[in-house]
RNA sequence: GCCCUCGUAGCUCAGUGGAUAGAGCAUCCCCCUCCUAAGGGGAGGGUCACACGUUCGAUUCGUGUCGAGGGCACCA
């Protein structure tokens, strides 16, 4: 991939040079001052601004404006800038880019095409992103949908930065909730068979349990009462896993590995983990249970590992599971989960530290998504698997579409609570922001198709005719894309991509309304088409990161 | 009580250690004989919860208060 030096970095390098020429002493310090280039909110303040003069005023014992003057005096000649930067306000240096610098991005976009914007910070290192990890005790609901969209987009983002990403789904297919599931199905079976049976107190009451019971009775005619609880459990888990797989497929989310909690028991990794912790001296017996001294590692209380009835708490297989992540060579691991599970973070980190196997302290990284409040008909819908009140992911996809659902979940910062108004999402699906972005892509396709020329010729068009404000805005937005992807990946913040995309789309739409592309002047026409072709590529790349389609027609 | 996240326009939400705080929806006013109006242009609407501190500069960082949600089991 050709190295595209974005304008901001280029400007920063230029001013860094000037600063050290003007104040050589700064260069020799232990921590040399680093120039920061920012984008002013106000267009009147130029394309970029440098505030170093203000920051250095105290240190250098000079007035900010004088420092700014000295920096400008030392500024090397460059074709990057349009005119001489201005000193404004208390001492900001406001900078405008030359047309040459602005149009440079176009050839970089064409050269890299689908890879434009990608970086190589990961340099092929392995990272695991674990997400969704829903218990196979019911269909996926809106909360899982948010997790699926965020986790998948994080995986895609990391891939753009050169990481070798593995997506993993951890199935809690062992433990009390699974037995609860089996008992719930069994109770429905007995009801259907006309046998008097009490429903488990904390059983799952959703309609899907009834369906599973009906299917079980059809398949195992000899066990209509569900007496073979083990068979019932296996059947129910398999059925629900299958349903969840279909949901995820409809959402275009794929996993590389499905890791079964039950395998940690059958492979002996749970026993191994416990034995290891006991051997390391981090455990003690109390009240007939085995405890981990997790408080030694920052947890707020010690945790029971083996209950007095001899079974393990979920905490133990969780540690064993994370140990396998490390041992499988994932020196970096990210876990995306709902904020209602955040309590498990401290004890998981503590548990891994207690293993004394060189796992870094912050391993794994966590991305939490806050809960979704679902509104329907102006009333909050309480989501409870056990009570059976539900808004499934499948419902959402069927009602508002995959693209809109994914975009909606990703466009908001994951750690803010959000209200999902189902009626709004359904009735106003035309107003969903995703269409705004997709429309920009489709509009460009439409213009190019109407033009009917050879796309290839646009890649070498003379761009000197691109001089309008709209063109300048669009060019600079395109040039921002690599940095945007880099930042979004570093911050594990997929929503930044959506924000960028809607801003880019807005610039395209404004341009479209202000200027005609298919003009008579051939030079101008080709230049404009070249610009929107590059814009189409960036829109497509950005939408791909969010997992949303880039339609050619709408 | 302790811990985590959040508190920005009527609503849903972005954003930032800097120079006039943004978008969408909602309200109001314009723009298709012209490349898709699923679009564009404009108006109104804010003590960025509150207080104190750090800073040349705080809506942004820190502390506290108040408010919302979540977590604090030998449940998962």
Image: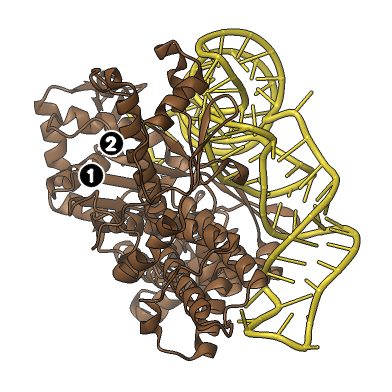
Q: Dividing the image into 4 quarters, which one contains the C terminus of chain A?
A: bottom right
How far across and how far down the image is residue B26, in percent?
81, 59
Q: Is residue A91 visible?
A: yes
First in sequence: mark 1 or mark 2?
A: 2
Residue drawn at x 53%, y 59% is A472
Marker count (numbered): 2
**Chain B as rendered: colour:** yellow
Residue drawn at x 20%, y 29% is A353
Residue drawn at x 37%, y 71% is A242
Residue drawn at x 60%, y 28% is A89
How far across and how far down the image is residue A457, in percent?
37, 83
Residue A77, above or below A534: above
Q: Answer whether labels 1 and 2 touch (C-beta < 8 Å).
A: no
Residue A272, above or below A74: below
Read off the chain for label 2.
Answer: A
How far across and how far down the image is residue A291, in percent?
25, 26
- Mark 2 surroundings: few (<14), some (14-19) or many (≥20) residues within 10 A: few
Residue A359, above or below A259: above
Q: Which mark is residue A309?
A: 2
Provide the residue designation for mark 1. A332
Q: Which chain is brown?
A: A
Q: Dividing the image into 4 quarters, which one contains the N terminus of chain A?
A: bottom left
Q: Is residue A144 visible?
A: no
Q: Nearer the viewer, residue A334 or A357?
A: A334
Q: Secondary structure at mark 1?
A: strand
Horizontally, residue A50 falls left or right of residue A317, namely right
């Amino acid at each position: 991939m050709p190295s595209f030096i974005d304008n901001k970095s280029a400007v920063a390098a230029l001013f860094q040079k000037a600063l050290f020429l003007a104040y050589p002493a700064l260069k020799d310090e232990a921590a040399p001052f680093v120039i920061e280039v920012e984008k002013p909110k106000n267009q009147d303040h130029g394309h970029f601004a440098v505030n170093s003069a203000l920051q250095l005023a105290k240190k250098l014992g000079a007035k900010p404006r004088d420092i700014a003057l000295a920096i400008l005096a030392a500024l090397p000649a460059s074709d990057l800038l349009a005119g001489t930067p201005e000193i404004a306000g208390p001492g900001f240096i406001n900078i405008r880019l030359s047309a040459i610098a602005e149009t440079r991005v176009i050839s970089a976009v064409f050269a890299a095409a689908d890879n434009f914007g990608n970086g190589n910070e990961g340099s092929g290192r392995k990272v695991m992103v674990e997400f969704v990890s829903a218990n196979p005790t019911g269909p996926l609901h809106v909360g899982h949908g948010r997790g699926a969209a965020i986790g998948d987009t994080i995986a895609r983002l990391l891939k753009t930065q050169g990481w070798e990403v593995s997506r993993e789904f951890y199935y809690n297919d062992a433990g009390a909730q699974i037995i609860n599931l089996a008992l719930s199905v069994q109770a429905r079976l007995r009801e259907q068979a006309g046998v008097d049976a009490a429903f488990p107190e904390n059983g799952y009451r959703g309609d899907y349990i009834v369906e599973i019971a009906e299917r079980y009775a059809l398949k195992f005619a000899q066990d209509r009462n569900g007496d073979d609880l083990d068979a019932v459990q296996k059947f129910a888990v398999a059925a629900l896993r299958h349903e969840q797989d279909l949901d995820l497929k409809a959402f275009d989310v794929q996993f590389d590995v499905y890791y079964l909690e039950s395998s940690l028991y059958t492979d002996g990794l749970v026993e191994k983990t416990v034995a290891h912790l006991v051997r390391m001296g981090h455990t003690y017996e109390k009240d007939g249970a085995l405890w981990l001294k997790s408080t030694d590692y920052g947890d707020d209380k010690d945790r029971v590992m083996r209950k007095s009835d001899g079974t393990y708490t979920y905490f133990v297989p969780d540690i064993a599971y994370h140990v396998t992540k490390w041992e499988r060579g994932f020196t970096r691991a990210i876990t995306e989960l709902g904020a209602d599970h955040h309590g498990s973070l401290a004890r998981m980190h503590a548990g891994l530290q207690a293993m004394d196997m060189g796992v870094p302290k912050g391993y794994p990284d966590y991305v939490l998504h806050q809960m979704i409040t679902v509104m329907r008909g102006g009333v909050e819908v309480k989501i409870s698997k056990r009570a059976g009140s539900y808004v499934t992911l499948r419902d959402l996809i069927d009602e508002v579409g995959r693209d809109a659902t994914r975009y909606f979940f990703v466009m908001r910062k994951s750690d803010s609570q959000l209200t999902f108004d189902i009626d709004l999402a359904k009735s106003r699906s035309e107003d969903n922001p995703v269409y705004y972005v997709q429309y920009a892509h489709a509009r460009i396709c439409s213009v190019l198709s109407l033009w009917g020329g050879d796309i290839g010729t646009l890649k070498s068009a003379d761009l000197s005719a691109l001089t309008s404000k709209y063109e300048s805005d669009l060019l600079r937005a395109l040039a921002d894309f690599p940095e945007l992807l880099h930042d979004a990946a570093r911050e594990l913040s997929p929503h930044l991509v959506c924000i960028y995309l809607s801003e880019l789309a807005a610039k395209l739409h404004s341009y479209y309304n202000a200027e005609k592309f298919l003009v008579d002047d051939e030079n101008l026409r080709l230049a404009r088409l070249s610009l929107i072709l590059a814009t189409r590529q960036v829109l497509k790349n950005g939408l791909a990161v969010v997992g949303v389609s880039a339609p050619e027609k709408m």
